[in-house]
Image (tube, rainbow, N blue to C red):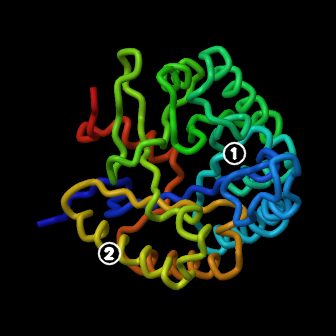
Amino acid sequence: MSQKSFWPNGARLAISISMQLEAGAQPAHAPYSPFAEMDAETPNPATVKWFEYGLKEGIPRLLNLWDQKGIKVTSHMVGKAVEQSPALVKEIVNRGHEAAAHGHKWEPHWRMQPDEERASYEANIRAIESAAGVRPTGFNAFALRNGPNTLEILQSLGFKYYIDDVSRDEPFSVSVAGKPFMVVPYTRRNNDIDRFHQLSISAKDFLSDLKDEFDVLYSEGTQRRRLMSVSAHDRIAGQPAIVKALSDFIDYAQSHDGVVFMRKDEIANWASVQKDTPHEA
């Protein structure tokens, strides 16, 4: 009996990598930095340099890795970061990767009034279009937290999917203003920003966890649509040891039959027309 396929071209498991471009958009007292603040008034120069590493070393190193492995990723881009590094954004898109929105500023959208929230997303769109000539169709909120108006605003602006939902290991849709809106689930498990900031895990440990997660999802992939998500932030995943772990993981995944690496817009487009894609009212 032939095995049922839940992905294009008979693939058994899809893997989607997120590459966040955030450097240059962070506030003076940025969270998600390993450097303690000195006082409430003084910007922290160590944090600034920490983020700059993502531009000078991290993204270029990751782009070379994706090229070496022949895969395409989705890059979630903060608008202010795009405005600071338009040439890098254009290079990301020219190499075949997806440019997705991540809000215009490094700030909580759930506190905004609807008009303010809409303006942030519109500015994010304009920044990406100006730098790379493409309009984003996917969205990732600051800290994965959306407000009560977020999805309707995104839908009205032409977005096709968002990722701020970790409730499934497969794409699905939700009802927004009476119409389906796609969800391509994100990850906290396979996320460098969660795993490395406290320096409590080694790159080899991360690789081991990625392999274990892959093994379970690959096994389940004979029975239902399975998606593995991996998150790579510019200033963290672009560090040499973590790039090696990602490289080794990709080699491991690609050594298995029926594994495909997909951009999130590709996943959303595919799943949106499949009759067996779960839908939540």
Mark 2 to mark 1 CA distance (whole Å): 30 Å
- In this image, 152 relative to 213: left or right? right
Q: Is mark 1 on a helix, strand or loop?
A: strand
Measuring from the top left, give residue 230's x and y in whole percent: 50, 62
Of residue 33 and residue 229, the one placed in the foreground of this image is 33
- Give the amino acid type for the residue marked by disc 2 in the picture: Asp
Q: What element carries label 2?
A: helix
Please, is residue 94 above or below residue 248 in the view?
A: above
Measuring from the top left, give residue 141's x and y in whole percent: 57, 39
Q: Looking at the image, which residue sits at the far left?
A: 1
- The residue depicted at 54 percent of the width and 62 percent of the height is 194
Q: Which mark is residue 147?
A: none
Measuring from the top left, give residue 70's x and y in whole percent: 60, 69
Of residue 51 and residue 27, the one placed in the foreground of this image is 27
- Give the amino acid type for the residue marked by disc 1 in the picture: Met
Please, is residue 224 above or below residue 103 in the view?
A: below
Please, is residue 74 above or below residue 197 in the view?
A: above
Residue 60, picture quadrant: bottom right
Q: Residue 77 carries which label?
A: 1
- The residue depicted at 86 percent of the width and 46 percent of the height is 41
- In this image, 264 relative to 22: left or right? left
- The residue depicted at 51 percent of the width and 75 percent of the height is 250
Q: Name the residue under label 2.
A: 215
The quarter of the picture where the C terminus appears is top left
The quarter of the picture where the N terminus appears is bottom left
The 10 Å Cα crowd at callout 1, few under 14, some 14 to 19, many 20 or more, is many
The 10 Å Cα crowd at callout 2, few under 14, some 14 to 19, many 20 or more, is few
- The residue depicted at 23 percent of the width and 55 percent of the height is 224
- In this image, 172 relative to 151: left or right? left
Measuring from the top left, give residue 241's x and y in whole percent: 65, 82
Q: In the rendered structure, are the residues bearing label 2 and label 1 in contact, judged by CB atoms less than 8 Å apart? A: no
